[in-house]
Amino acid sequence: MKHYHYPEAFYHLADALISAGEFIDSKGWVPATSGNFSARLSDGTIAITVSGKHKGHLQHGDIMLIDAQGNSLDGKVSSAETLLHVQIYQRFPDVHAVLHPHSLNSTLISRQHKRKVTLKNYELLKAFSGISTHESRVVVPIFANDQNIARLAEHVESYMDDNEEIYAYLLAGHGLYTWGGSVMEALRYLEALDFLFACELNEQQD
């Protein structure tokens, strides 16, 4: 394979994704080779994890570059779910990172609720940009898992067209997608959501 010359900004984002992967793995949120992460460069290209790599042990070679439509620019193969990342970036120009883990809490809650999880009156909701009071609610829709990723991306897009703004969504029996203006913001959302899902799951057991 011909050597691809990555821009310097790629390596900065790759480092951020590697660090995020180490943190997420330390929480047990990406077992085996599950999950995928990405970050968008200023020119619109996207750094994304290579398919089949353990997200807790990422190296620069495990991050690749795709264009804004999801096509590989360096000959490597990205996740089968790449189009879900692309959909988010195409819809939200201010989003620069997408994180998708398979945590226990997100997987369980996605199986126990049918259409959505509504989080309300939690202090931690203030972790989300634009929310300044616990007297708020965040809706996390749940979509049926689908091996046809293009069709699933269209389903997500259609939901976003018809509903209030969301910070994340769940795939039933699968995992969580969340995004932000930076890798750190997306990581903050991820950590907050996993805690809030744990709260909801524990309340259901009472």
Image: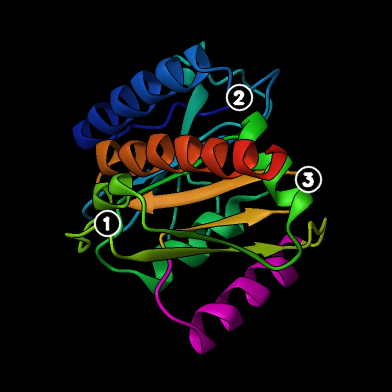
In front of the other: label 3 or label 2? Answer: 3
Query: Circle 3 sits in a helix, a strand or a loop, which is it?
Result: loop
Quadrant placement of the C terminus: top right
Horizontal side of residue 165 vs 16, given as left or right? right
Identify the residue at image location x=39%, y=52%.
179
Amino acid type, mark 2 = Val
What separation in Å lies between label 1 and label 2 (alpha carbons)?
29 Å
Q: Residue under circle 2? A: 30
Amino acid type, mark 3 = Gly
Residues in magenta, as a range: 149-166
For residue 200, say whether it is visible.
yes
Q: Residue under circle 3? A: 173
Label 3 crowd (10 A; few <14 / some 14-19 / many >=20): some
Amino acid type, mark 1 = His
In depth, the one of 118 and 169 nearer the eye is: 118
In front of the other: label 1 or label 3? Answer: 1
Horizontal side of residue 130 vs 52, given as left or right? left
Say if the magenta span includes residue 77. Answer: no
For residue 74, say whether it is visible.
no
Quadrant placement of the N terminus: top right
Percent of width and height locating residue 160? 51, 78
Horizontal side of residue 15 vs 192, given as left or right? left
> What numbered label is drawn on residue 134?
1
Q: Quadrant of residue 134?
A: bottom left
Identify the residue at image location x=24%, y=63%.
94
What separation in Å lies between label 3 and label 2 (alpha carbons)?
14 Å
Query: Would you say the residues marked 3 and 2 are in contact, meaning their CB atoms lie under 8 Å apart?
Result: no
Identify the residue at image location x=59%, y=51%.
82
Percent of width and height locating residue 201? 64, 40
In front of the other: label 1 or label 2? Answer: 1
In depth, the one of 21 and 111 nearer the eye is: 111
